[in-house]
Amino acid sequence: MGLYSSFIGRKFKHIAGKKYEDIIKHYREFLLTEEERKIPEIHSILMPLDRYVKNIPTELYETISAYEARILLVYILDSQVFELVRQTLSPEASEEFRRREEIMGEELLNNVAKKLESYGLKIQRRIFFGNKSDDVIRMAENYDMLAISRNYGAEITKTSPLSPLVLKIIQHLEIPVMVY
Amino acid sequence: MTPLEVFALAVFIFTYALIISERIHRTVAAMAGGSLVLLTNVVPWGKVPVYLDLDTILLLAGMMIIVNTTRLSGLFEYIAIKTAKFAKGEPIRVLLLFSVVTALISAFLDNVTTVLLLTPMLIYISRLMEVNPLPFLLSETFASNIGGMATLIGDPPNIMIGSAAGLSFNEFLFNMGPIAFLDLILMIFVVYLAYRKVLKVSKEKKERILRTLDNLDERAAIRDLALFKKSIITIVVVVLFFFVHDRLRIEPAVVALFGASLILFWSRENPEGILEKIEWATLFFFGGLFLIVGSLVETGFIRQMAQWITSHVHAEGDAILVIAWLSALASAVIDNIPFTATMIPLIKAMGMSLNTYPLWWALSLGACLGGNGTAIGASANVVVIGIAEREGIKITFIDFLKIGIIVMILTVGAGVGILWARYVW
């Protein structure tokens, strides 16, 4: 630091150091930061669904439709649960589990896709076995936004209004996330 | 020179050197110097009330209470957002409006608080416009020093001059107001000329800026609506009292203290919290300085200096020139408060052979506007540069000097011209 800078720094501290901290703290309460001012461009949205996602609010469809983005609806069948059923019950039981889950998944994907298409959006659908949190985190890297239900991956309770899986996913992402 | 004179002069020079170096806090330097002249009895204890200018100290304290209480309401942030909205994302309007608003607020409140409250908003809006913030920050700094010159309460040198010479608020406004007005126009013109190429934004960018500004809610800045209203009323009442204080035969310090007690009484704010925010360091700085300069008066050094000056300067016109330019050059490099404190007894002593009335205005002109010359010339400059540095904007000594010295020469020159026309021709 040069002589001039250190002189200014010292004098500033003497004159206004504490006062400035108070003022800038107040300004931060209502002025947007540079990062907040930048409106993110959303061209693609990832929307994971599963058996716990029951009611999708109309407001979400309306908000998503404002972006005019390409949307991937993904239904992930929990491979760990499938393996657990196969080992503890029987291979037949696990197959039955897979079949029922797939039917439920297809139905949910179709319903949501139909609704989104009615807003004129381009929809892609995928259903596969995998890890409900890790796969979403991996896939989200190629998308501009994530829209996720707070019920995704687990039932929510009064004491835990957000599924732990959703919490984990949000903590690992840098893209904007819409939690509904 | 007597040994006492030498000692008083040595304390004076040593203290001023410490203040200029900023190695230790200026208050500590002034207090140390003040206590030294008291310890050695250069200034006898009985003479302390004579040299300690209570008018200045109490006026400053009263205004500090009013400003610190008003600050809690969010009034200044409200004004900053309103100004930004009025500017409509147009760089020239931002330059013009913020300069005028800064000058107006600085005319009634202290410069440091004014720039502390407006600079964050100015940086925000220049970032929004994606233009170089330098012209806006420079014009704000210059405007603050120019506006402060316009009234008795705008800048500490004016408070000291007003108290020492018994000048009223209206006399200041009548003599320095027109100079400040002309200087403000000159300054904005200089800054515009120097930076006109960067003061442009495209139409698309302007629309985006307007959208962001529209989303800014000035009402969100108001922290306490009741206090907000009470603060405005108190400031208006205080300013009105300042306009008539000489007719009512009330000292300016009494007006400030009345305003301070009014806002404390009415707002029901915790007085301990407000009084803690008084800049005691500044008040003790003034106290120490008054005693050190008092020691020079007491030993007769100031009288001898005045005699020497009046033997060389024979007319008021010459004295105006010398005092205004000497004050401007000195204030460009050292703090104008200790400089003014030294000049006041000198000008008083010159009253033996000269009419000092125009000389007070010359001192005010030089002491207030000299600060625009360099980056370290005034507290407001340091505060703006300090805030800019914290926000990642570098204002070098040369950046400031290039424009500052031109602004200083032009504004002091214009002021001297007006004073000369009024009192010499």
Image: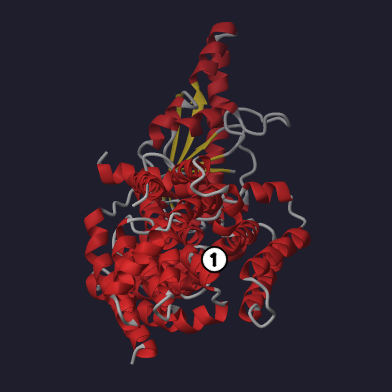
**Residue pictured at 27% horizontal, 46% vertical:** A4
Q: Mark 1 lies on which chain?
A: B
Say left or right for B412 vs B169.
Answer: left
Does the image show residue B347? yes
Check the image and name the residue furthest to the front.
Answer: B2
Amino acid on which disc 1 is placed:
Leu
User: What residue sits 43% from the left and 67% below the top?
Assistant: B144
- Out of B249 and B92, give the one closest to the viewer: B249
Return the residue nearer the eye: A179 or B162. B162
Q: Quadrant of residue B414?
A: bottom left
Image-quadrant location for residue A1:
top left
Residue, far bottom: B425
Q: Name the residue under label 1.
A: B109
Position of residue A98 relative to residue B386, above or below, is above
Q: Which of A121 and B44 is in front in this view?
A: B44
Please say whether residue B130 is visible from this viewpoint.
no
Residue B282 position in % (x across, y down) = 52, 51
Question: Measured from the top left, where is residue B424 in percent x and y?
Answer: 35, 88
In this figure, what is the number of numbered marks?
1
Is B303 above or below relative to A166? Answer: below
